Image: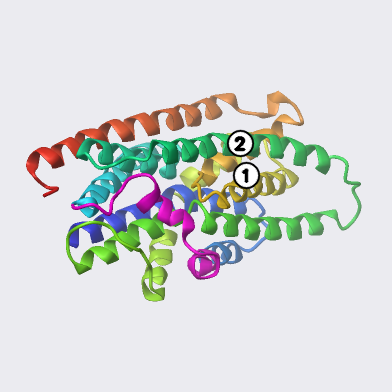
Amino acid sequence: MPAFALAAIAFVLISGANDGATLIGLGLRFPAVPGWLIASLLVAVLFAGPYLMGIAVARTFTERLVAFGAAGGAATFLAGVVIAVVVVAVLTARGLPTSLTLALIGAITGVGLGAGLPVSWAGLGVVLAAGVAAPFAGLLLGYLFGSLSQRVPSYRRMPRLVRAAHVLAYGVQSVAYAANDGQKMIAVVGVAIASAAGPGGIGEIHVPPPWMAALTALFFAGALTSLTRVGERLGRGLAITRPPHIVCAEMAATGAVLGSVALGCPVSITQSIAAGVVGVAAREGLARVRWQHVANIVVAWLVTLPVSMTLAVLAGLALRAAGGLR
């Protein structure tokens, strides 16, 4: 239980530093919108999410990819969480907003494979296909929304309407995060809570409201630790952006993420946001995109899955050799 508690705390903090900083940093690109409103919207929606929208995506991590219900499943899952935290912590420390969701998918699949637990390759294929499709959807939607925004006539109250649209789009984007990508934290914390009942496999997970309140507080604390470094890189490093660009990118990311909720497939909102920003900016000319920053993030994404899976396979083999799964 202490090991699970420490791993869960670290995982939620890293989630905040990676996902939370990206979401809040992009939201703060509108100086006229109060920072407390941006932060409060995300935290409130994240807290209420599992009780209003269910935890189908969280169960994908604990049930759909690997049969963690077998003996030793909890210890194996813990090893995967630790691997994912280490990989993303290294990349986040370099200011690269990589995908913690992708790292966790690779790590729990790899550690299950190394430990000899049944792995659902069909389920993994569906999840990875959705993960690959989401950034392309964000790119396409960003380009389309950018095209539509250029056709909106400008008039005196336009700045006020754009700010209102930003708050609305940001709120819906927060809902998309809570319904999909953010549920990886619920999976980890839920397993940590379940492990208090004793060692063994992973059963049904749930997160009581007091635990969910602690989760959201840790998430926000993690976001504050890297808000400037990660949030600013997405808001200003990827492309030369203006307020309408931000609104279009938020809408594009929301559409890309919500499209996978019905399938129960976790996809990365950081990938979708980045793709949306690039798609919107590219509509006004490729010169608006800072391709070196885009290349750095793409490299981080490409490295995340194979590195996480390789390290996790080794960890699973070590667990099995040490008899940790008996």
Check disc 1 and give the amino acid type: Ala
- Closer to the camera, 230 or 67? 67
Q: Which residue is mark 2?
A: 275
Q: Position of residue 99 (x, y in %)?
A: 45, 41
- Closer to the camera, 119 or 198? 119
Element type at mark 1: helix
Labels 2 & 1 near each other (Cβ < 8 A): yes
Residue drawn at (48%, 41%) of the image: 127
Taking the image as shown, residue 281 lies to the left or right of residue 76, namely right
Taking the image as shown, residue 294 lies to the left or right of residue 200, namely right
Q: Which of pointers 2 and 1 lies earlier in the amino acid sequence?
A: 1
Check disc 2 and give the amino acid type: Ala
Badge number at residue 256: 1
Q: Position of residue 241 (x, y in %)?
A: 68, 39
Callout 1: few (<14), some (14-19), or many (20+) C-alpha neighbours within 10 Å? Answer: many
**In this view, the mark in front (2 or 1):** 1
Residue drawn at (34%, 56%) of the image: 188
- Closer to the camera, 276 or 176? 176
Q: For residue 89, what is the image quadrant? A: top left
Residue 65 colored magenta? yes
View extreme (bottom): residue? 210
Q: For residue 235, what is the image quadrant? A: top right
Q: Is residue 14 above or below residue 234?
A: below
- Asked whether residue 95 is in view, the answer is no
